[in-house]
Amino acid sequence: MNDPRTRLAYLDSWRDLFREMAESQVALPSSLIDTLSEATGIPAQNLRAGIGVMCCGWAQLRRSPFMWNITLDASCRVTIVAAGNIPGVAVAPAVMLAAAGCVVQVKLAAADRWLLPWLLEQHQSRSPETPDAIHAAYHPPDSPELHRWLTEADRVLAFGSDETVATLKQQYGQKVIGFGHKFSVALVDASQATDTVLRGLAYDVLLFRQAGCLSAQAVFVVGDDAPRRWLDALSAMFDRVLDEEFGRPPASDKQAMQWSTTRDVLDLSGAEYLMADDRSYFLAVQPQFNEDLLLGNGFVQIIPVTDVTGMLRQLEPRRGQLQGCALAMEEPMASLAAQELGRFGFSHVCPPGELQAPPLDWPNGGALLPEAVFQW
């Protein structure tokens, strides 16, 4: 795809597919969703809703393609090592890099071997005249095929745990761009406890069972001296969304033991909390951000703060691991807070309900693609 017009058409055809999926004009097969559900443990309804939200974001661009030089005559070979915590981690970077002229190889995760190949089939059927530059396959970590992909690549994009990223950097050097562990939060004004905001927060927490880097793990509430009402309001909305839209996942024995221990600790500290009877979520008021309570599976800290600066002060020790922030404030405070959050390092600031829907070209972890790939 050396012709800029061809690259733009390729990018637009992908965005059209994502848009039609978001609008339910193109449906994910039930067999695909059921397979993903079995592999990930995430209920099928939750997966379908989550992928739909992601497609809403993938259909958007934040920047003009010409800002990232779509006319560049690139011959770069990129291997993406995808993580399996949620489906579709490699989709956006693969499409962006292919549209920029790269040959892209995606090493699929064991728990997510099906979504990207299905998307590639759908896209190829729409644009048979343009051979796709994305090749996706699952290779075991110790396979010769994966070693060849990584060795021959000009650049490697590595998603996964910090340990996985560190190992790949040690083996393959400076050509590895790492995307390790990150998490997200929400910042809301006390006056914003509306159904729209609460439902958005439920999506930001419960989609993909809180397993993604864009899943909210804590809700910071500005100007509320009675955060207990957020426990009650969020609990009621979580129940509603789970019952009507996402389904309730079974709690594992490990999670049950972990949350039982956590409940004992909270009882000793006198903290207010609410845990669903089926352990589908656990909400707890905390005086300040507690790193030990980044538990996932629907666990949310609710933390009162005086302003955005108070939140950032508490998050400073984890600054390098922050990803997105769902923001609910009235203007002009919302715009001022968004600027401060961006300067602090949040790569995706959005209204509640859109954490899982960043645009196709969002700067994941601060890395703009495809520019980061072409910087040697």
Image: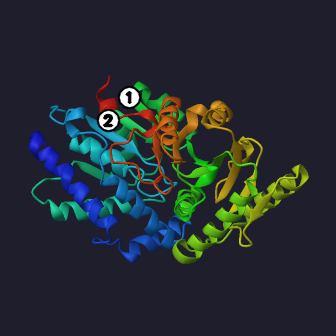
| Residue occupied by mark 2 | 153
* Secondary element type, mark 1: helix
Give the x, y percent position of residue 101: 20, 39
* Secondary element type, mark 2: loop
Instruction: Name which residue lies at 27% across and 41% down.
Output: 97
Instruction: Name which residue lies at 22% across and 39% down.
Output: 65
| Residue occupied by mark 1 | 175
- Looking at marks 1 and 2 on the same chain, the residue that comes earlier in the sequence is marked by 2
Give the x, y percent position of residue 335: 46, 39
Q: Which label is found at residue 262? A: none
Give the x, y percent position of residue 368: 36, 34
Query: Badge 2: how crowded within 10 Å, few (<14), some, or many (20+)?
Result: many
Give the x, y percent position of residue 289: 71, 41
Residue 179 is at least partly visible in this image? no
Vertical placement of residue 288 versus 267, above or below: above
Residue 59 is at least partly visible in this image? yes
Badge 1 vs badge 2, beta-carbon distance below 8 Å:
yes
The three-letter code of the residue at mark 2 reads Ala
Is residue 307 rendered to the left or right of residue 101? right
Instruction: Name which residue lies at 69% across and 58% down.
Output: 230
Residue found at the far right of this picture: 268
Is residue 312 rendered to the left or right of residue 341? right
The three-letter code of the residue at mark 1 reads Lys
Q: In which quarter of the image is the N terminus?
A: top left
Q: In which quarter of the image is the C terminus?
A: top left
Observer-side mark, 1 or 2, equals 1
Nearer the observer, 181 or 57: 57
Nearer the observer, 174 or 265: 265
The quadrant in which residue 249 appears is bottom right
